[in-house]
Amino acid sequence: MSTAKSAASSASVVTSSFEDRPSRWLRIFAWASFVLNTLIIATGGAVRLTGSGLGCSEWPLCTPGSLVPTPELGVHGLIEFGNRTISGPLLLAAILVVVLGWRIRKSRHDLFVISWIVLGLVLLQAFVGGVIVWEELKAVLVGFHYTVSLIIVCVTAAYLARMYEPSGARERAVPRGFAVLTHITTFVMAIVIFIGVLTTGSGPHSGDADVVRNGFDATLLSHVHAWPGYLLVLLTVVLLVWARRDKLRPAKWFTALLAVQVVQIAVGIYQARNGLPPLAVGVHMVLASLTAATMTVAVLKLKRPASDA
């Protein structure tokens, strides 16, 4: 009898595990959502850095009476419309992640909630994008637009991180001091990114020659942006050494985080010393989102499924 019960219990665990597992298509579209949200930061940066922000003068149409750019708009219209075009697949990917996650919504409530957050933020971005065009690229709105995109990249990265782990209760997998220092580092990163957005908003790349910037001193802000940036690297080094020494769960993610930060600093120094070349500024913007996404995963790795204990 006990053998039969044991076999039944094992079968139940296997079945439950199978039912909890995200399908192949869900995994594909979850990755697509992450990639497309990162890509749209790159294309959005291209719009701004090439002065194409008003390449399409209307929204949701490109021009009055035309959904697509007309020949008169030239390359600026194509660049702006290209950025808008990515919004379609991006929205579709977000919707499909919600739909495909419906089957496991009860057992993987965490993934289901995250998918709805992503979809909500994507819809918010579409609305903000329209307001930006209507308000002729106000620097504050453009900065907010970028920040929301960065947050979406972080949330889609969180979805991917949780997707490859089992459901259920989680517990802290690192010493309390390590967790506290990680959260402090996250806060410092948020400050770096916030000042970076202000710095870009005061610089020469406004998206259109007639757009008024935010009024801050760009040179001063570039220095203010750098100071917490160096502190961020120092904190990351401390966390990496600690994690490697004690063989903590997030060790490899802090390795990746430090690598991205080093590249980001190199690009930042290069652009500051060479008059803010558009390509370098665009790379800097994308790297900022990837840095934040890596930090997000590192924070999630502070805990582990309770079954791994």
Image: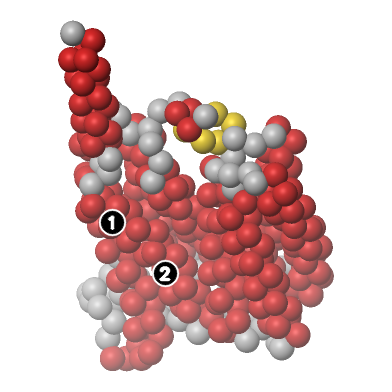
Asked if residue 205 lies left or right of residue 180, the reply is: left
Residue 195 is situated, as x and y percent measured from the top left of the image, at 70, 60
Residue 64 is situated, as x and y percent measured from the top left of the image, at 27, 74
In the displayed structure, would residue 22 be above or below residue 105? below
- Which residue does the image show at 24% across and 73% down from the upper left? 67
Q: Is residue 206 among what the camera can see?
A: no
- Which residue does the image show at 73% across and 78% down from the upper left? 269
Asked if residue 16 lies left or right of residue 179, the reply is: left
The amino acid at mark 2 is Leu
> Which dot, 2 or 1, sits closer to the camera?
1
Counting every numbered tag in the picture gives: 2
- Which residue does the image show at 32% across and 61% down from the upper left? 32
According to the image, label 1 marks what residue? Answer: 29
Question: Which quadrant is the N terminus positioned in?
Answer: top left
The amino acid at mark 1 is Phe
* Residue 56 vs residue 230, the one in the foreground: 230
**Alpha carbon distance from label 2 to label 1:** 15 Å
Residue 86 is situated, as x and y percent measured from the top left of the image, at 32, 69
Picture quadrant of residue 168: top left
